[in-house]
Amino acid sequence: MNKANVALREFPFPAHCAVAISSDIDNASSVDSFKEIMNYFNSSSNTIFGNGLGLEVGNSFWFYTNSNKPQLSYFEGITTRKSKFAPIIRELWKSGHIDTMHSWGNFDLGGFDRSLADAGLNELQKCSTKIPVWVNHGVGLNLQKLGNYPNMKGDDPSHDAYHLDLSVEAGCEYFWIGKTTHIIGQNSHPSITNKLKLGLQWLIKRTKYYGTKDPIYDDGNELLFPIEFRDGRKMWEFIRFINAWGQEHILDINELTKQLNPSIIKRLIKNQGYMILYTHLNEHVDLAGLPQSLVKNLFYLQEHVVNGNILMGTTSRILKYKEIRDYLSYKIVETDNEVKIEVQDFIETPIGVKKIQENQLMGVTFYCDTPEKTTILLGKTKLDFKINPKDETGRQSISIPWQNLIYPS
């Protein structure tokens, strides 16, 4: 019996929601603009766009590019000669600010085969790097895409473009296949607005996309859901937010203004959900300055991150937090003078059992009636935590501190 009344809080105290900006590397304006926009979002130093926001915003990369447009990639074209962009990618691999592989490359003109994935994996291993997030890129000849849609061959072991085993070895554990949503906050409170949008997406799925296998709209509002690929591997699929409603265009730096409208941020906080926001952060960046309407909205977002209303992190960190929060297993051991929360070092999920490390417990928050008498242990290791004041529920809690990534100077 849990006399100490211990229970998990949904978000790290005092947050009411969580958000990550998930940026695809397509059509990045230049190496310089990539560096400057990442500095502006992540650092607190002076940048060409003004004082840095000090947020935590990740990005994605390609190893290769075979496109009719100039693109940024780790290697030059489909060779293994390192580009001038490669040192920047390696630096952000190390800091955790590049945590997403936007497929092995841009193969709009074709040319992908397993040997290219093998060479990319070898480079990651030489750099002792793991990439937790996979995001599909492109249509047509981008056969490396994963999922059972037309021209997606990356998880088909009978095809020359099969690579899923190598991608998993590279560290990928969360996969975006193509599903998007207009609902503000996944796993959020079932408001009337959310129910209406779910109903409309259900209708679109069965009319506009009638006959399409696994169309882009999903029936539910889950952030993470299990997917079984054609090679039998069970992994996590996740969904990304486009906008509150309306047609998707190119989702570039200019459209980010609409995606981060204060009304959306307010609604996300009210709905108490998770959001992985789909954008192309580095597309159409003008080094002469950002749109003032975007800057205004970014200041509004920054205010709510700083005051604790919003937990903001890279895509992989928000997804990992959600996974561990949902499947964390712990035991309460009580005596007259002490309450021990004994956390298991593994989680059992619908896709299998996973070991967890101490640093993956950042942000985990337990409600408890006697925080001054409570300890948290992972195995035999006593974990540091902070005691929080009462939140909107009137309950006190304790949190394993969430530490932001350190952006390289």
Image (cartoon, rainbow, N blue to C red):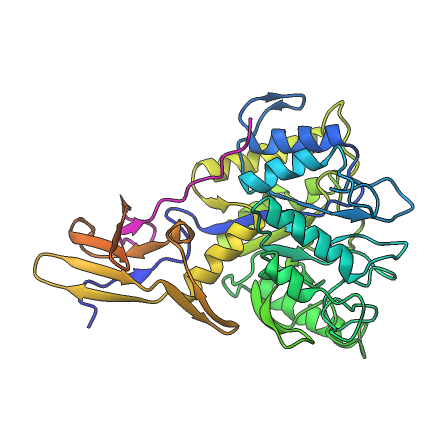
Judge whether 7 appears above or below 44 on screen.
below
Q: Residue at x 70, y 47 (%)?
A: 279
Image quadrant holding the N terminus, namely bottom left
Residue 57 seen in this snapshot: no
Q: Residue at x 57, y 33 (%)?
A: 42
Relative image position of residue 384 (x, y in whole percent): 28, 46
Secondary structure of the magenta portion, mostly? loop
Snapshot quadrant of residue 280: top right
Magenta segment: 388-409
Judge whether 114 appears above or below 52 on screen.
below
Relative image position of residue 146 (x, y in whole percent): 72, 66
Relative image position of residue 230 (x, y in whole percent): 69, 76
- Front-most of 125 and 332? 125
Q: Which residue ends up furthest to the bottom in the rendered image?
A: 211
Judge whether 394 appears above or below 292 on screen.
below
Q: Residue at x 44, y 51 (%)?
A: 16
Q: Let me know if residue 404 is in the magenta part.
A: yes
In this picture, residue 269 sits left or right of residue 234? left
In this picture, residue 132 sits left or right of residue 12? right
Judge whether 217 appears above or below 130 on screen.
below
Q: Let me know if residue 24 is in the magenta part.
A: no
Residue 335 seen in this snapshot: yes
Q: Residue at x 58, y 68 (%)?
A: 235
Snapshot quadrant of residue 8: bottom left
Q: Which residue ends up furthest to the left in the rendered image?
A: 336
Image quadrant holding the C terminus, namely top right
- Front-most of 17 and 93? 93
Number of labels in the image equals: 0
Relative image position of residue 65 (x, y in whole percent): 82, 47
